Amino acid sequence: MDSQPKEAIPQWNNTTKLIVALVLVVLVGFLIWKFQFILGPLLFAIILAYLLYPVAGFLHKKVHLPWRAAATILYLLIFLILIGLLTWGGISLVEPLQNLVTFLQKLVTDLPKTIADLTSQAWMIGPFRINLSNLSATQLWTDLQGILSPALSSIGTLLGNIASGAVSTITWTAFTLLVSYFFSVESRGTRSNLIKFTIPRYEYDFEMMKVYLSNIWGAFLRGQLVIFVLTYFIYAILLAALGERYFLALAVLAGLARFVPYVGPFVAWTTYGLVALFQGTTIFGLLPFPYALIIVGSAIVVDVIMDNFVSPRIMSSALSVHPAAVLVMVIVSAKLIGFIGVLVAAPVLASLKLFLHYISRKMTDLDPWEDMALPVPPPPIKDTLRERWQELSKRISGWFLKRRAARMKKTKE
């Protein structure tokens, strides 16, 4: 079919364009409000595709597999690992749940006889003699039934909620993996094709926006991964040296706390203190309260060092957003897209800042990219990890050497 002559193509006037734009904005806003429950898994699927891209690229380039085959093998392997973990976890829970049900059944069956035995004799507690024979075993059993029935019903409801929550988690995990797989496969081995969208005459703006957004999210994901790994190892060594229980799990908590400014570290410090306070045994035979203070104080010192010396060097200026604004964004994004929003509040805020900069420059007829320097590609993540670890090791060893030199000087004097 012959193409329509250019002069015959009807042109929209400004009023029509404005109406269509407003309708689209309202429609998009309505869809976001109506289906906001899907935003978190969708965002996580995109992040997962971005994170797994280097692994699929390794299989594609080094093993010489087609891109689709490399992505399929990678996601299938992840799916099988998750299925194995869920199966192992389910089998591990079956026996304790069976024992709990058996215990409750035996408790309910033996309870009338136990009550009858208790009320048929007198009990001596120190100098006091307690006679329960005046109590009616039938009435006592009736009263206990009134207490136990709601409790058992609540346990059943709780188990039902746990089961439904597990099914929901499995469903959303499968959905996230599937969407992430399609993003990865359709990129055809090009990272810029993970999300491909453009508008005629705005191709350059879209390419530039993609460059800056990739820099923001790449810096965040790489930086957070480096910070998480460093924080995990530092806290695992520190808490193990101080003799705190569950130090591996607490080290994971310390790494996750780095995602949420102020609130995350405070929750982590509180958790360390409570575990130290109630764990019983302490290092050097200290009392629980001083021991908990040492644990929390050490954690505060580590976090201050991470916040002021390590994080700024790793994250650079890619996320130049105010910490207070990030804290507000944590609340907003948590309300909008759930727990995922808490983790990615900082890059979401940086992305919104970029969009607002672009819109404001366009509305004032200025070039949006004129006052923005092109981002420099970051070094490979293994080099970043090695460099930061060597730098941290030098600082620690230098501090110990200074202390040792000071002690030797003091001894000579």
Image (tube, helix red, strand yellow):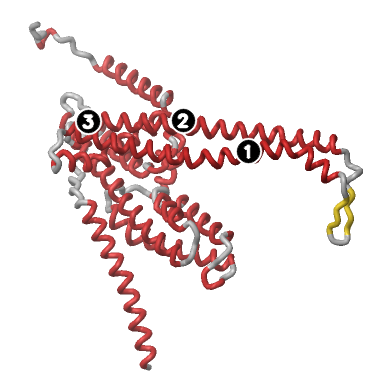
Looking at marks 1 and 2 on the same chain, the residue that comes earlier in the sequence is marked by 1
**C-alpha gap between disc 3 and disc 2:** 27 Å
- Which residue has dot 2 on it? 167
Q: Residue at x 55, y 32 (%)?
A: 161
Left or right: 60, with 151 as reference point: left
Check disc 2 and give the amino acid type.
Val
Q: Residue furthest top?
A: 1
Residue at mark 1 = 102
Residue depicted at x 26% and y 40%: 52
Q: Quadrant of residue 30?
A: top left
Residue at the (54%, 67%) spot, across then down: 282
N-term mark: 3 or 2: 2
Q: Nearer the viewer, mark 1 or mark 2?
A: 1
Callout 2 crowding tier (Cα within 10 Å): few <14, some 14–19, many ≥20: few
Residue 284: image x %, image y %? 53, 73
Q: Position of residue 36 (x, y in %)?
A: 42, 28
| Residue at the limit of the structure toward the bottom, as seen here | 413
Residue 55 in sight in this render: yes
- Camera-side residue of 242 and 199: 242
The residue beneath circle 3 is: 185
Q: State which tag comes first along the sequence, 1 or 3.
A: 1
Q: Amino acid at mark 1?
A: Thr
